[in-house]
Each structure stands twice: as C-alpha cells, then as structure tokens.
Image (cartoon, rainbow, N blue to C red):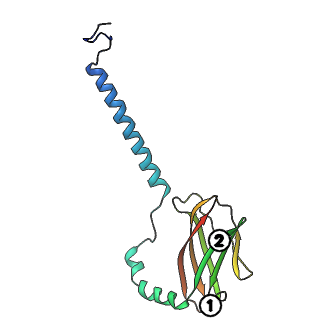
C-alpha cells in the first residue's frame, strides 16, 4: 500500500470517488422510485370519471341536497359504525336508500361497504377498522328521490 502525504495509508482515488457518488445517488434514486410507485399504486386519485359531465348539474343537485337540511355525523361504538342522519326537524331523516364506502384517507386497500341496519334512530353496521383518519363516502336517497352525497370524515382513536 502506498502512503499518502499525511502518512495514513489511505488515498482518495478517482474510482473510489466514483463508487461513493454512484452509491449515494443510486440510493437516493432507488428511494424516490420506491416512494413514487407506492404513492401511485395506493391512491386512485379519481373522484369522478368525467369532471365536465359531473359539473353540468352540480349547482341544481347541490341546491336540492341543501334543501333537505340533513346533518350527518359518524362515530365508532365498539366494533360498530354509527351513522346519524338528522333532518331539519331534529329527528332522524327519512332515508329511502343508503350506500356508503368506508375507507382510509390515504389508500384503498382497506375499503369496505358497511351493511347498515336502521336501529335506535341511526344506521349501524359492524366494521373492523384500525385507528386513524377514515372517510365515509355517503350516497343516500331521500323519500322524495333527492340524491344526497357527502364525504364524512371519521377519526378513530387508538
């Protein structure tokens, strides 16, 4: 081994510098590609198939939905999701149909469609969810046929 000027026996050569740079930048690129793949593969990012078509009747649908005067809240009681839809009179709203998609805010792998039963003034369904932030994408139809859509945020404490 040849000695360098300070007598330590270590020389920084061109191939060593190249190896260090390739390792450092290779690691950074590999991590970025992994995170980009994870972000794209776990979140669909799609709310509606065609935003132009969805926007055509938005104002009319929003006005009809707001005219219902419904107030929606969600909570977890044990292993049960409790969804309350209260009308403007303070009593449970007259809901003809109810469909909901329960999912984590960041990915779709744990999405589930709860099977609700109306009991004690609220819609109840057994669910298995971990602590964290969840979204309920609610679609309900009023007795008069008015469509009600809302995203309800649900925070589950751990």
Callout 1: SS: loop
> Which one is in front in this view, the residue at disc 2 or the one at disc 1?
2
Q: x and y percent of residue 131 in the render?
A: 62, 59
Looking at the rendered structure, which numbered label has been put on residue 75? 2
How many neighbours does mark 2 have within 10 angstroms: few (below 14), some (14-19), or many (20 or more)? some
| Quadrant including the C terminus | bottom right
Which image quadrant is residue 50 in?
Answer: bottom left
Q: Nearer the viewer, residue 149 or 51?
A: 149
Which image quadrant is residue 147 in?
Answer: bottom right
Q: Nearer the viewer, residue 44 or 28?
A: 28
Callout 2: SS: strand
Q: Is residue 89 visible?
A: yes
Q: Is residue 57 visible?
A: no
Q: Earlier in the sequence, mark 2 or mark 1?
A: 2
| Quadrant including the N terminus | top left
Estimate the spatial distance between the alpha carbons at disc 2 and disc 1, rounded to whole Å.
24 Å
Q: Which residue is mark 1?
A: 143
Q: Nearer the viewer, residue 11 or 148?
A: 11
Q: x and y percent of residue 83 in the render?
A: 65, 76
> Is 122 left or right of 132, judged from the image as shown?
right
Question: Height in image: 119 above or below 24?
Answer: below
Q: x and y percent of residue 151 in the render?
A: 53, 73
């Amino acid at each position: 081994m040849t000695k360098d000027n300070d007598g330590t026996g270590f020389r920084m050569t061109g191939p060593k510098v190249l190896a260090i740079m390739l390792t450092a930048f290779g690691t950074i690129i590999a991590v970025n590609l992994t995170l980009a793949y994870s972000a794209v593969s776990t979140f669909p990012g799609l709310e509606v198939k065609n935003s132009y078509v969805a926007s055509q009747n938005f104002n009319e649908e929003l006005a009809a939905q707001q005219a219902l005067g419904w107030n929606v809240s969600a909570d977890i009681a044990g292993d049960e999701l409790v969804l309350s839809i209260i009308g403007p009179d303070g009593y449970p709203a007259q809901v003809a149909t109810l469909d909901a998609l329960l999912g984590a805010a960041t990915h779709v792998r744990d999405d589930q469609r709860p099977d609700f039963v109306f009991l004690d003034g609220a819609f109840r369904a057994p669910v298995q969810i971990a602590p964290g932030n969840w979204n309920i994408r609610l679609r309900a139809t009023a007795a008069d046929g008015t469509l009600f859509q809302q995203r309800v945020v649900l925070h589950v404490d751990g």
